[in-house]
Image (cartoon, helix red, strand yellow):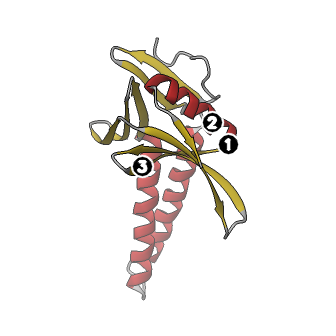
Amino acid sequence: MPGSKIANLPAGWLAYEVRNGLNLHVSSTKRKYVTTGGVILAALAALKTATRWGGPTPNDALSWLGLTVLLSFFAFWCAFGEEWWHLERNCLVHRIGLGGWAYSRSYKDAELQLAVRYNRNFNGIYFRLYVLAEGKRHFLLERKQVELEQLANFIATRTAWRILRS
């Protein structure tokens, strides 16, 4: 059943079985608020662009036009963008995109790495999950420690990969 709750998965995550494995993604229940905020900001920037258009400083209008386009793209991405992970034994596929236009990366014969990092600018600790494949480290997720450990264990169980900690 699509979107069914699977044990050992953190809150806010959905997973469903497919023919060759399992698809995993973040629930988009709160996404509509971010999308609405992006649309409002894009509309305000468009209004400011319209009031500056044809004025004495054309560069000012172009700056506002650029901001309008950027905020519009952000709102569009929030509304229609997708990110999901497909898990199989010894395989993880990470896909990001809009419908048929997507970028995906596949990893096989890999290991997971839980990394703790310290941000000197903001005096904070953050946690990331990487895939170590073909001698390279590839970023997967950044979350709070407890959620990231649950996800790492869930992915490791499905892929049979080891979890390294650093």
Distance in Å between CA atoms under marks 1 and 2: 6 Å
Circle 2: element type: helix
Q: Amino acid at mark 2?
A: Glu
**Badge 2 vs badge 3, beta-carbon distance below 8 Å:** no
| Image coords of residue 69 (percent x, y) | 40, 61
From the viewer's side, name the closer residue of 153 and 13: 153
Name the residue furthest top. 1
Q: Amino acid at mark 3?
A: His
Residue 138: give its label: 3
From the viewer's side, name the closer residue of 5 and 70: 5
| Image coords of residue 117 (percent x, y) | 62, 57
Left or right: residue 110 versus residue 48 is left
Residue 50 visible in the shown view = no
Residue 87 visible in the shown view = yes
Q: Residue 50's image quarter?
A: bottom left
**Badge 1 vs badge 2, beta-carbon distance below 8 Å:** yes
Residue highlighted by disc 2: 149
Residue highlighted by disc 1: 145
Q: Residue 163's image quarter?
A: top right
- Categorize mark 1 by other alpha carbons within 10 Å: few (<14), some (14-19), many (20+): some
Tell me which residue sits at (62%, 31%) in the image. 150
Circle 1: element type: helix
Name the residue furthest bottom. 56
Tell me which residue sits at (45%, 67%) in the image. 67
